[in-house]
């Protein structure tokens, strides 16, 4: 049977079915890649690294307290039922699905092109100062790009985070992340799509500019050393710190180390409902930008009693409405003009 003899309605239905199957295949591939790609921020390898670090920490603490090293108590400490049965954790898993699949289209079409920023800045530098030629080794150039792109990402993260806490309009979307009342590695996905949209565009502007500038200086454009598209140093931060920052594990860096790197305890302070902790520890892995801009708060070595979440009782943060719709409603309230005061004239 030729295609011409097939009714148009059946042909359209067949085309739509093939498109749907292809799309489902893409979604399944993306789901697998989230867990198996070494460069993924939620790979099984990075989760395993976080588990081993946490396991070693709990085991050493048990030994320091003179307790016998038994597997069951350690595992109960690592996976407490109260956290994994909470509504907050279930909502985190919902956001994981949303932000890895459903929200991908939004981020994709609205993202500023990294290549466009890079080429635009490189063209502007060439027009202003003339072309450059390679004057260093390829290895040196790649090392410089790796370090510069890592620092650019860290600064973009800090700046976006600072704006999200200080600008009321942006805070209404970022506060969704802070509605988590328990912290697990999946909490990193508890992000409103608009919040992600702002961050990705800001990161592209800063990192694209950095990439072009370093490439112009060295005369050898590149992206530095990466694994699966992820910066090597940033990926190391994810393996060593990233997952544990959203966890119940109180691992604290104090003193000099606490002014260089943001430990899990640093980030737990950031999620605290204590007003003294608002807007503190805004960086990703490095503490240097928090130090430079005065937003660092060092944790104590001993666990601090913290409560997580925001404005309890105002709305249901662990529902689709509370997590996705309420931020738009609250933003609309911000844009609504304040009512004029009623002035009455006094009778003589």
Image (tube, rainbow, N blue to C red):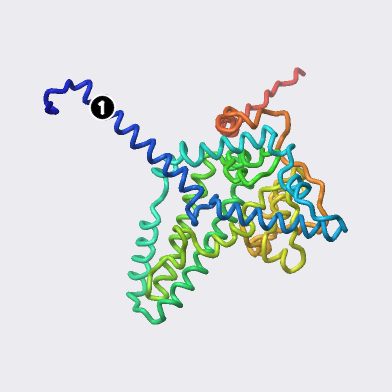
Residue 57: x and y, percent? Answer: 74, 58
Task: Identify which residue, 31 or 127, lies in the foreground.
Answer: 31
For numbered disc 1, what is the local secondary structure? helix
Task: Identify which residue, 292 or 238, lies in the foreground.
Answer: 238
Q: Quadrant of residue 322?
A: top right
Q: Quadrant of residue 17?
A: top left
Q: Quadrant of the N terminus?
A: top left
Task: Identify which residue, 343 or 324, lies in the foreground.
Answer: 324
Task: Identify which residue, 341 or 264, lies in the foreground.
Answer: 264
Residue 144: x and y, percent? Answer: 48, 73
Residue 43: x and y, percent? Answer: 53, 51
**Local crowd size for mark 1, using a 10 Å CA cut-off: few (<14), some (14–19), many (≥20):** few
In the picture, measured across the screen, residue 251 lies left or right of residue 64, that is left
In the picture, measured across the screen, residue 120 lies left or right of residue 240, that is left
| Image position of 215 with respect to 31: above or below | below
Residue linked to disc 1 = 14
Residue, far right? 66
Q: Quadrant of the C terminus?
A: top right
Residue 219: x and y, percent? Answer: 37, 75
| Image position of 260 with respect to 331: above or below | below
């Amino acid at each position: 049977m030729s295609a011409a003899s097939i009714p148009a309605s059946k042909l359209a239905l067949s085309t739509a079915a093939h498109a749907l199957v292809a799309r489902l295949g893409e979604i399944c591939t993306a789901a697998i890649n989230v867990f198996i790609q070494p460069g993924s921020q939620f790979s099984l390898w990075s989760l395993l690294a976080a588990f081993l670090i946490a396991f070693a920490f709990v085991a050493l603490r048990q030994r320091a307290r003179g307790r016998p090293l038994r597997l069951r108590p350690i595992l109960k400490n690592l996976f407490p039922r109260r956290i994994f049965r909470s509504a907050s954790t279930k909502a985190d898993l919902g956001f994981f699905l949303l932000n890895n699949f459903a929200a991908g289209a939004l981020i994709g079409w609205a993202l500023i092109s990294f290549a466009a920023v890079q080429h635009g800045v490189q063209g502007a530098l060439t027009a202003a100062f003339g072309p450059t030629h390679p004057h260093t080794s390829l290895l040196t150039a790649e090392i410089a790009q790796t370090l510069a792109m890592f620092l650019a990402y860290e600064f973009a993260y800090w700046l976006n985070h600072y704006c999200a806490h200080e600008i009321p309009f942006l805070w209404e979307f970022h506060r969704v992340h802070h509605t988590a009342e328990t912290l697990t590695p999946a909490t990193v996905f508890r992000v409103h799509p608009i919040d992600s949209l702002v961050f990705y565009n800001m990161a592209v502007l800063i990192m694209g500019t950095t990439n072009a500038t370093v490439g112009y200086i060295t005369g050898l454009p590149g992206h530095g050393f990466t694994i699966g598209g992820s910066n090597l140093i940033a990926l190391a931060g994810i393996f060593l710190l990233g997952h544990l920052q959203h966890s119940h594990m109180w691992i604290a860096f104090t003193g000099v180390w606490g002014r260089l790197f943001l430990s899990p305890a640093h980030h737990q302070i950031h999620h605290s409902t204590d007003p003294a902790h608002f807007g503190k520890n805004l960086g990703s892995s490095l503490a240097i930008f928090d130090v430079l801009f005065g937003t660092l708060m060092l944790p104590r070595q001993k666990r601090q009693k913290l409560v997580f979440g925001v404005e309890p009782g105002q709305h249901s943060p662990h529902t689709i409405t509370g997590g996705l719709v309420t931020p738009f409603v609250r933003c609309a309230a911000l844009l609504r003009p304040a009512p004029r005061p009623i002035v009455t004239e006094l009778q003589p």
